[in-house]
Image (tube, grey):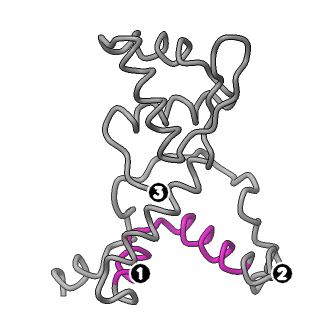
């Protein structure tokens, strides 16, 4: 699938957040609260997204209902795969990626790897079962903008050495 333009990304975000099929009118009304935009612009963008394979649509009365073909998470995975494919040294790229993770994110990655190899729900040395991907995680979820305290990147470790 081809990449998304700025307005296409905004429309996709609204449709992913909606969780159910939406008409052009519903997306237009939602977007209009944040920006000046013409109905025909939204209609054209959604039609383009349909033609590009991002959206499926079904006629409901006189209007189409649009919904994403793939989930936001699947798109995020595609982007990670594209970034890895663009690397000339995949191992080093993966190391840099993992170094940026919080301990919780690293645990989720380990669990995802175990899940894909058929070993979901692995046990640690204490016998506690690691939650599977998608299981609720204890504690508040906070967005990460960089390495957490005590979770320095290799560059930061080298600079202080």
Nearest to viewer (mark 1 / mark 3)? 3
Number of other residues with Cα within 10 Å of mark 3, as a class: few under 14, some 14 to 19, many 20 or more: few
Sequence-wise first label, 1 or 2: 1
Task: Give coordinates of residue 134: x percent, y percent.
Answer: 72, 56
Number of other residues with Cα within 10 Å of mark 1, as a class: few under 14, some 14 to 19, many 20 or more: few
Q: Quadrant of residue 36?
A: top left
User: In the image shown, does 35 or 21 lie closer to the viewer?
Assistant: 21
Check disc 3 and report the residue beneath it: 1
Magenta span has 111? yes
Check disc 2 and report the residue beneath it: 127
Q: CA distance from mark 1 to mark 2?
A: 29 Å
User: In the image shown, does 14 or 43 lie closer to the viewer?
Assistant: 43
Residues shaded magenta: 93-114
Question: Residue pushed farthest left?
Answer: 159
The residue lying at 48 percent from left, 65 percent from top is 102
User: Mark 3 and mark 1 in contact (Cβ < 8 Å)?
Assistant: no
Check disc 1 and report the residue beneath it: 94
Nearest to viewer (mark 3 / mark 2)? 3
> Where 86 sits versus 108, above or below?
below
Q: CA distance from mark 1 to mark 3?
A: 24 Å
Magenta span has 72? no
Sequence-wise first label, 3 or 2: 3
The residue lying at 40 percent from left, 54 percent from top is 2
> Where 89 sits versus 120, above or below?
below
User: In the image shown, does 69 or 109 lie closer to the viewer?
Assistant: 69
Task: Give coordinates of residue 25: x percent, y percent.
Answer: 53, 12
Task: Tell me the element at label 2.
Answer: loop
């Amino acid at each position: 699938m081809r990449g998304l333009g700025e307005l296409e990304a905004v429309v996709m975000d609204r449709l992913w957040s909606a969780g159910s099929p939406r008409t052009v009118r519903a997306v237009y009304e939602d977007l209009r609260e944040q920006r000046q935009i013409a109905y025909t612009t939204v209609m054209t963008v959604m039609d383009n997204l349909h033609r590009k394979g991002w959206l499926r649509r079904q006629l409901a009365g006189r209007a189409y209902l649009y919904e994403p073909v793939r989930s936001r998470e699947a798109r995020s995975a595609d982007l990670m795969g594209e970034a890895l494919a663009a690397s000339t040294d995949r191992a080093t790229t993966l190391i840099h990626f993992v170094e940026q993770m919080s301990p919780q994110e690293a645990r989720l990655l380990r669990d995802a790897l175990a899940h894909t190899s058929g070993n979901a729900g692995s046990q640690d040395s204490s016998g506690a079962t690691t939650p599977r991907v998608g299981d609720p995680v204890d504690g508040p979820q906070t967005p990460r903008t960089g390495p957490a305290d005590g979770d320095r990147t290799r560059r930061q470790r080298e600079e202080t050495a």
